[in-house]
Image (cartoon, rainbow, N blue to C red):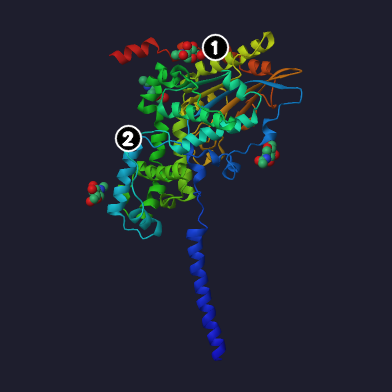
Amino acid sequence: MRLTRGLLKRNLVLSALGIIMFRFSSAYFQKSTIPAIANYFGTKGRYEEVNPYLIDDILSVNKSLSKPPSPDCRAIHLTAIIRHGTRYPTTKNIKRMKRFYSLIVNESKGTYAWLRDIKNNWEMWYTEDMDGKLVEKGRDDHRHLAMRLATSFPTLISVDNFQGNRIKFITSSKHRCVDSVEAFQEGLQRRWHIQDTRYSQEINDSLMRFFDKCKKFIENVDNNKTALLEVDLFKSSDEMKNVQRRIAERLQISLSDITPDMVEAAFFLCSYEFAIKTVNSPWCNMFEKTDAQVLEYKNDLKQYWKRGYGHDINRKSSCSLFHDLFRRLDQTAYDYRFGQVAEAVTVQVGHAETLLPLLSLMGFFHDETPLTAANFHAQHGRTFRTSQIVPYAANLVFVLYDCNKGLRLRFLLNEKPMTFPGINQPDPLYRTVRDHYSDLLHGCDFEKECELRKANRRNSEL
Ligand SMILES: *[C@@H]1O[C@H](CO)[C@@H](O)[C@H](O)[C@H]1NC(C)=O
Ligand SMILES: *[C@@H]1O[C@H](CO)[C@@H](O)[C@H](O)[C@H]1NC(C)=O
Ligand SMILES: *[C@@H]1O[C@H](CO)[C@@H](O)[C@H](O)[C@H]1NC(C)=O
Ligand SMILES: *[C@@H]1O[C@H](CO)[C@@H](O)[C@H](O)[C@H]1NC(C)=O
């Protein structure tokens, strides 16, 4: 009897210990460095989430994806249009983060462990002068991407072409983009063990920041409060209200203090801590999957109406980049036929705002129904999902091949081959692609599309 009681007691102690150990280990040892909501960060998402095999080996490439269309094909040109790497938040968002952080520190009465963690152990280390600059992880994004692309396309991204100046670099003037290009060049130099050579890049904002040059876009969308009406409506939707209510509850802060902007600031804090430092910060515990999905949709709505299909001028503002791409491909085709290809590779670095309009112009990720404030649930399976399309260092790669039957064009988004919308075959003939886009190739004039109509101009002068 005594023995059994002793055993029982020991078992109880052991199982209590077990529970403690389990709690302890699940909180500390098994805690993933990847937040459960990491797939919902939209344009603030990490590239590795789009290609998870990179988490184990950042230099691995899937060779089967970069094989030529058929053995008789030879790659003759590659154009890569790449978003800058991971960056700091902008000043506007840093201010919001600071405000929300002080509110929590001063007002929150919640008792969760993660909340104590925020209050006692987490420090507000973001400063306003960080304003959107590239971080070290962002340099790595580009160094590693350069190395992977060189592995995937060794005949084009080659040391010979690099040193022979047949790889051209073009960038937006923003420091985060210039720094990204330099990191890309560094990646190539590391891969080939070459040093002490300065490679140049050309700054071209007409190409990489066309949205700043398009008057019609600026007036009709960028400076137009009602152009993003759906985003504002969604901010006051039931879905968003529910997120605010749940956060207020978790923090034990009055609901009236929790604005959609505040909620978003905390969501951004979780995403930045992860993207910049690869940590699963206590900020991430503030959100459940359903909350994250609502915030993801809010960001997608904004991109849809400001950079995507929402307004026709968003897409059309990229006409110059579209023509530039096809002019390059045509030029290579011509060079190849009549002599030597002068520009084997073009690397162009810009912004999510550069990639999204071009993708939309070319018909990618076009959902049948527009994204609106009212159809969050119906849009659950939408293709326009910026978390998947434009994470940091997102890239569009066009590869032109010379094959027995003619030139073929392959398109890869974030290192995965995609079929062109309306051409349902992989690696179509280049002339099929040209035919498919013939309306755009014969029209889509940047000057004309971006010109303000006289009536508009008169109005704005009044
Ligand atoms: C590589 O790509 C092929 C084709 O999409 C796929 O079947 C395969 O699973 C991929 N391999 C890896 C290691 O991801
Ligand atoms: C929170 O408290 C700190 C320190 O007392 C103060 O500087 C800050 O203004 C307060 N913030 C808010 C939002 O009340
Ligand atoms: C930018 O690129 C466009 C299109 O290729 C070209 O016409 C223009 O001259 C370039 N601008 C600069 C400043 O290099
Ligand atoms: C602003 O956007 C709304 C909605 O798209 C549009 O109806 C209106 O004409 C735009 N205003 C200007 C000045 O472009």
Secondary-structure class at tag 2:
helix
Q: Is residue 414 visible?
A: no
Label 1 sits on what residue type?
Gly
Q: CA distance from mark 2 to mark 1?
A: 43 Å
Label 2 sits on what residue type?
Asp
Residue pictured at 53% horizontal, 33% vertical = 143
Q: Quadrant of the C terminus?
A: top left
Instruction: Please identify the residue farthest to the front as the structure is shown.
Output: 196
Which sits earlier in the primary sequence, circle 2 or circle 1?
2
Q: Which corner quadrant of the image does residue 218 belong to? A: top left
Q: Which residue is mark 1?
A: 443
Say few, some or many: other residues with alpha carbon within 10 Å of mark 2 (under 14 / 14 to 19 / 20 or more).
few
Q: Quadrant of the N terminus?
A: bottom right
Residue pictured at 58% horizontal, 18% vertical = 164
Say few, some or many: other residues with alpha carbon within 10 Å of mark 1 (under 14 / 14 to 19 / 20 or more).
few
Give left or right: position of 383 versus 281.
right
Number of numbered discs overlaid on the protein picture: 2
Point out residue 30 in the picture as x, y percentages from the top left corner.
Answer: 52, 58
Secondary-structure class at tag 1:
loop
Nearer the observer, disc 2 or disc 1? 2
Which disc is residue 129 wearing? Answer: 2
Point out residue 149 in the picture as x, y percentages from the top left corner.
Answer: 60, 30
Q: Which corner quadrant of the image does residue 306 belong to? A: top left
Point out residue 259 in the picture as x, y percentages from the top left corner.
Answer: 34, 44
